Amino acid sequence: MPVMEISPSSCHVFLLLATLAVGVVSGLTIQSDDARIHYHGRWDDSPGTWWAGSGFKLHVKNATTMKIQLGPTTTTPFAAVGVSVDYEPFFTVNASAGWNDIPLPAAPTFKRSDKSVIRVNVEGWQNNRINLQTIVFNRGATLHPYKPSKLSFQFIGDSLSAGQYLPLGVDQAWPFLLGEQFKAEHTINAQPGATLTDIPSYGNVHGVSFQFFKTEDTGYVWTADHNYTTPWDFRRDRPSPTHVVIHIGANDVSQGVTPDQFVQEYLGFLKRLRTIYRTQPIFVFTPWGWPSADGNVWYYYDGKYEEIVRKRIALGDSRIFLVNTTGWVTFDDVFADNQHPNVPGHAKIANLFSEWLENWGLRPERQWATPA
Ligand SMILES: *[C@@H]1O[C@H](CO)[C@@H](O)[C@H](O)[C@H]1NC(C)=O
Ligand SMILES: *[C@@H]1O[C@H](CO)[C@@H](O)[C@H](O)[C@H]1NC(C)=O
Ligand SMILES: *[C@@H]1O[C@H](CO)[C@@H](O)[C@H](O)[C@H]1NC(C)=O
Ligand SMILES: *[C@@H]1O[C@H](CO)[C@@H](O)[C@H](O)[C@H]1NC(C)=O
């Protein structure tokens, strides 16, 4: 066979054939480096997601069809992705490397000629990597900048905040629901099984006091193509969080971290957080505990969260607040076999914290900054 010479015109033929083969390039094509994509959460340079809840938001007009092309580092066989159009409830798409259809609901919820907000995020605390390459809408669709909410929550925690065991993962967890209630941006760095203390715990090679400052969640260690961490550049959190919420300690107590060690760890973590979040209010949750069938609730580190907050205030930190969650969660609110909040339990916690915040003085936004 003669070696085929690639002339400019045969190049065009190849491109045309490639275009016909994927059948989608005729529409509005958006590359992953387009500044109009509003990324949130932790993305590496590929760009690929880490940590439950990371994703992107788009403000688009006249969209009827949507496809996303994902690259090779996407979780196999798929990553569960939550999708919401025009602030309607999230639904799941199992997205894989290659082209994925994102079903857009029909009118009237989704008014074709109007601008719409499409939100996409990974739901899982594991198997949560999407490697975004291209987004394609129908011909006639136009992309517009997404304006983020003035309110932006940063949540830090473990399985009790990550949505472990929930059908829609983090999208049904109390931090996510709270963010939605306040019409706020929200980022959730929550690692199931992890201690605050930087020690190995239930499959995590590091504690949250280490991992929070990294792009990757602790799943990196099980990941052959990206078996390392990189520092997270907090300037990439745009907008910068306006409120920081921490609920942690359950795994520290299981791993035998003593109450006094825990206080020291937590104070060290807060000191480091204050180098990033200098003036933002920080909310420290007490544990809501582990409820059992007999009606008892097992609380841990009694009095220690109060001590942490007291000590910070003594150091001159006036923007730190204890959220007393004692009594918030009963056996009805948890899965019987693992005592983690169930779907109604997470909604209840979100409502109680929402009430707490309103009493504290924070009002939800009246409408989303980018209305649908
Ligand atoms: C996603 O995959 C899971 C596991 O195979 C399956 O149970 C679920 O129904 C799938 N969801 C959708 C929306 O395809
Ligand atoms: C919407 O897109 C269709 C093609 O899909 C086009 O015919 C129509 O003019 C567009 N409408 C607006 C308002 O841009
Ligand atoms: C990642 O690196 C760690 C430590 O070097 C090693 O123990 C682990 O097996 C590696 N994991 C993968 C999936 O390559
Ligand atoms: C937390 O709330 C419980 C139940 O209302 C109460 O008994 C306890 O004293 C409170 N703790 C603090 C530190 O306010």
Image (cartoon, helix red, strand yellow):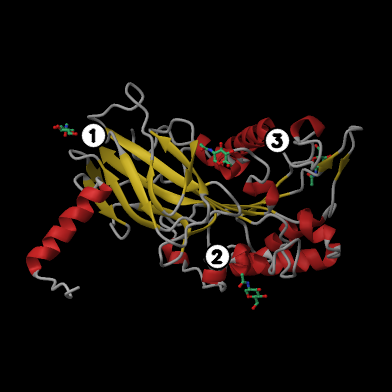
Whole-percent x, y for residue 221 in the image: 62, 69
Q: Which residue is mark 1?
A: 62
* Residue type highlighted by circle 3: Asn
Vertical order, 13 against 88 (above or below): below
Q: Which mark is residue 285?
A: none
* Residue type highlighted by circle 1: Asn
* Residue type highlighted by circle 2: Glu
Q: Is the residue marked by circle 1 packed among few (<14), some (14-19), or many (20+) residues within 10 Å? A: some
Q: CA distance from mark 2 to mark 1?
A: 35 Å
* Secondary element type, mark 2: loop
Q: Which mark is residue 216?
A: 2
Vertical order, 74 against 20 (above or below): below
Q: Which mark is residue 342?
A: 3
From the Cβ of disc 1, is ligand 2 less than 8 Å away? yes
Q: CA distance from mark 1 to mark 3?
A: 38 Å
Q: Is the residue marked by circle 3 packed among few (<14), some (14-19), or many (20+) residues within 10 Å? A: many
